[in-house]
Amino acid sequence: MADPEPNPQINFDNTEIAFANKSNKELKKTSRLFKLMSNNLLTKLLSSVGLVAVKYNLPFARYAVKQTIYEQFCGGETLLDCQSAIDKLYENNALTILDYGAEGKSTPEEHDEVKDQIIQSVKLAAANNSVPVVVCKLSGMADNGLLERLQESDERTTSDQKDYDKLYERLDEICSIGNELGVGIFIDAEESWMQITIDKLAIEMMSKYNREKVIVYNTYQLYRHDKLAQMKKDYEISQKEGYLFGVKFVRGAYMEKERNRAEEMNYESPIQKDKASTDKDYDEAIKFCVENYKTIGSCCATHNEKSSLYQAELIAQLGIDRTHPHLNFSQLYGMSDQITFNLAAAGYNVGKYVVYGPVKEVIPYLIRRAQENTSVTGEMGRELKFIQTEMKRRKL
């Protein structure tokens, strides 16, 4: 443990640091985009129309999407396209987490294609000091119905067993190459009705590849009331079995879908009763992981300023080296720059989730970004406020 350092002077209101990587022209364009997304009805219309327009290659649809929300939230259509975003982030001391954004794949050929894309991401990451981790979404490498059936019953048909074995092979190949090249693998969390299957696979991969270094990370969604306890239990297992524990903790991404399904199918919702409970569990997860940082590699993945500051201050208070590879932060590319770049300026390990892929493939991801930025409790108002503050500071 390093000598205690003074508390970090982090001010998330510092827009000069937050937008140092944006020219005046880029800042004005970003401002126009977030103003557009502040119109809830317009965003809903554009989301539905945009999805259809891009899907059927309507004239100018792809160009319009690419020049606006795609450019804001994605690194590029291909891995090579992402290099400029990776370099620009690193110039401002921020790392990159590569995420191939294609969703809803259903055929074995498509699943293999996703696997191959992730492996290419791992190889690119190995060639860049600023890309320590890539993301792996299991629903992109297996049929969602399979993940659900595996969770519902221990009994498997011959066909399901064969498909499961293929999924295992795909994931194992990714983790094996990550291990060989020293690149971390974030296994994303998904809906509760397939998450147990994903958790089991993640723990198997951790046990296999986290013996000397944290390579595999499972994701815990703390808006679920059972996940903090499960994270601690999974950690205890890792201690008994002698491997390092990898954890990315998020608040969560499927709240409405989870609540609606629970109501329709008449079972208890896995979602916390209120936001305060989620916040409490999230900060408890931060404390647990930071205090056990020698045996836990963690990533505090959030756009919440209080939680980000809490982890930063806790690291400083405990006198831990803030560049320790087990202690990380992340935000999505195109959002919460005031958190990312102020943490980076203070010397912490912080990265942007850089999603990439063809416009048609990442449209569902982009629509979620647009929709969450329109909600009153979402990010739009805050993002726009910071942008306008910086524009005023620059006298634009």
Image (spheres, helix red, strand yellow):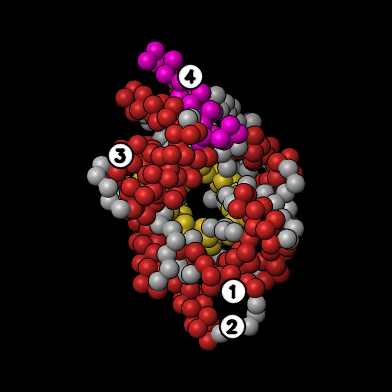
Q: Amino acid at mark 1?
A: Arg
Task: Left or right? Give the position of 268 relative to 394.
Answer: right
Alpha carbon distance from label 4 to label 2: 57 Å
Q: Is there a contact, CB below 8 Å, between mark 1 and mark 2?
A: yes
Which one is closest to the eye, mark 1 or mark 4?
1
Q: Which residue is mark 2?
A: 156
Q: Nearer the viewer, residue 148 or 280?
A: 148
Give the mark nearer the N terminus: 1 vs 4.
1
Q: CA distance from mark 1 to mark 3?
A: 40 Å
Q: Residues within 10 Å of mark 2 (few under 14, many from 20)?
A: few
Q: Specify the amino acid type for callout 3.
A: Ala
- N-terminal of the pair, mark 1 or mark 2, is 1
Between disc 4 and disc 3, the foreground one is 3
Disc assigned to residue 149: 1
Task: Looking at the image, tell me whether mark 4 or mark 3 is earlier in sequence order.
Answer: 3
Q: Which residue is mark 4?
A: 389
